[in-house]
Amino acid sequence: MPGTPTLTEAACPIPLAPPLRPFRREDAAVVARLNNAASGGLHLHRWQEMAGAEGDPWEIGRLRQIGRMEDGQTMVVVDRGEGVEAVLLGNPIGLEPLELPEAGLYRSVLELQNLVLGSWYLNDVATVESARRQGLARRLLDTAEAIARAGRHDLICLVVSDANAPARALYAADGYTERARRPIFKGGWDGPGNDWILLTKRL
């Protein structure tokens, strides 16, 4: 029997006009670094734990981006011809509460997501340093709202660290307001911030 075709590009529920396009497998290494930057280094910490002393945490991060695509997450990049300059990652939150681990790096984030069941979750918007302050993040925020509306969601949400002042300013200027906070469980991670903040915007 023929095998299942390998996905090469993420699905997107709305049409995209250049420089926006769906994530492709070859974007995964760059997107992993953007994904980690948006997390303040939390993801790399987790990938290092997974890789162990002999493994490559960035390779784990790269493969996890491909796994997101295969899981059907929305992944949109900005590419003006020189490769990925910015990325949007997101997915709907279901109507059933998410199962919470007893502890761990992501428990607080999952607790916050359980406050906004049925919304569209903006997992990451991140831009490479050389392309910042050019309106790319705001264009991706507009795209996220269009995707959420296409899925008939009336609320879009995200979680950001209280230490990430530039991101919080961007989201506040775009109409997001604080809904709740939870302490950041750091374990062995030495990243900045004390609280995860849930921001929401009614569509």
Image (cartoon, rainbow, N blue to C red):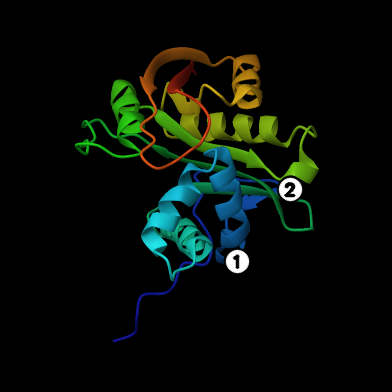
What is the quadrant of residue 155 in the picture? top left
Q: Residue 123: x and y, percent?
A: 48, 37
Label located before the other in sequence (2 or 1): 2
Regarding mark 1 in the picture, which secondary structure is present there? helix
Residue placed most toward the observer, 77 or 52? 52
Q: Is residue 90 left or right of residue 85?
A: left
Residue placed most toward the observer, 85 or 8? 85
What is the quadrant of residue 54 in the picture? bottom left
Regarding mark 2 in the picture, which secondary structure is present there? loop
Q: Is residue 192 above or below residue 42?
A: above
Residue at 43% across, 55% down: 47
Q: Is residue 67 left or right of residue 108?
A: right
The circle drawn on residue 89 is: none
State which mark lies toward you, 2 or 1: 1
Task: Provide the residue designation for mark 2.
Answer: 19
In the image, farthest residue toward the bottom? 1
Residue at 55% across, 54% down: 32
Q: Residue type at mark 2: give it.
A: Pro
The circle drawn on residue 26 is: 1
